[in-house]
Image (tube, rainbow, N blue to C red):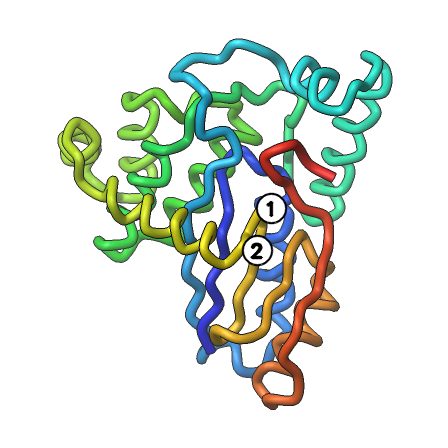
Amino acid sequence: MKIQIWSDYACPYCYIGKRHLEHALAQFSRADEVQVEFKAFELYPHAGKTTVNTTQQRIEKKYGKSPQGALEMIAHIEKTAARAGLEMNYRAVKNTNTFDAHRLAKWADSLGKGQEMHERLMRAYFTDNAELADRGNLADFAADVGLNGDEAKQMLACDDFVQAVKNDENEAAAAGVQGVPFFVFDGKTTASGAMPADSLLKLLNQVYQEQQSGNLTGAACGIDGCG
């Protein structure tokens, strides 16, 4: 079974959804037959290389929230992450452009370290609160998963894997994907949002048994925000 997941490193529900899937796979009897592929999606394609606002400020602007309302939304996401076993400092994240981070993940995947790199980038953003547009940071993260940091810098300095990221984004656009995480199971059954682990386990069994083809939804992040 192949599972494709469109996600972005600035998406809290993508990190939560990834962990839910891991919990579901831990209970899935055919987990050793599952191949997971992460696909690139940018929530903030026009974001710059440096941080210009806080999570609270972005939420206030996007949703018209009061300062207190924004803080309550942040707290809800952090608590949801904690229930999934994640340490998420969402209020302190440093939002920047993630295109190079997606390129790095593609490069790492070509070297057999895609899963480890994806996890490291998520943790870097939500737990360590690092800027993912900083190529020095990205090279360090590559080294953290056992890759050569200098080679990572060289890759990022050229146009390698630019088209691979764009291909993922074009594929998502053609499929009408507007929010992430977005899961595709064996190219036919989809689930959008951070589905609970038990729901994902049920879906894994259904897809494996070829008993269902359809769509499921959960909490997700789109270009207008997370909801």
Q: Is residue 208 left or right of residue 171?
A: right
Identified by mark 1, the residue type is: Gly
Which residue is located at x 42 percent, y 52 percent?
39
Residue 14, position as x, y percentages in the image: 58, 46
Camera-nearest residue between 147 and 213: 213
Residue 195: give x, y in percent of width and height. 70, 58
**Residue type, mark 2 in image:** Phe
Q: Residues within 10 Å of mark 2 (few under 14, many from 20)?
A: many
Instruction: Give the structural element (helix, strand or loop) at label 1.
Output: strand
**x 44%, y 64%: residue:** 36
Distance from Cα at disc 1 to Cα at disc 2 = 7 Å
**Taking 135 as reference, is 76 above or below it?**
below
SS for tag 2?
A: strand
The image quadrant that residue 35 belongs to is: bottom left
Count the labels in the image.
2
Across and down, in percent, residue 27 comes to 64, 73
Mark 2 — residue?
Answer: 182
Q: Which residue does the image show at 26% across and 57% down from the upper left?
A: 112
Task: Say above or below: 100 vs 221.
Answer: above
Q: Which residue is mark 1?
A: 179
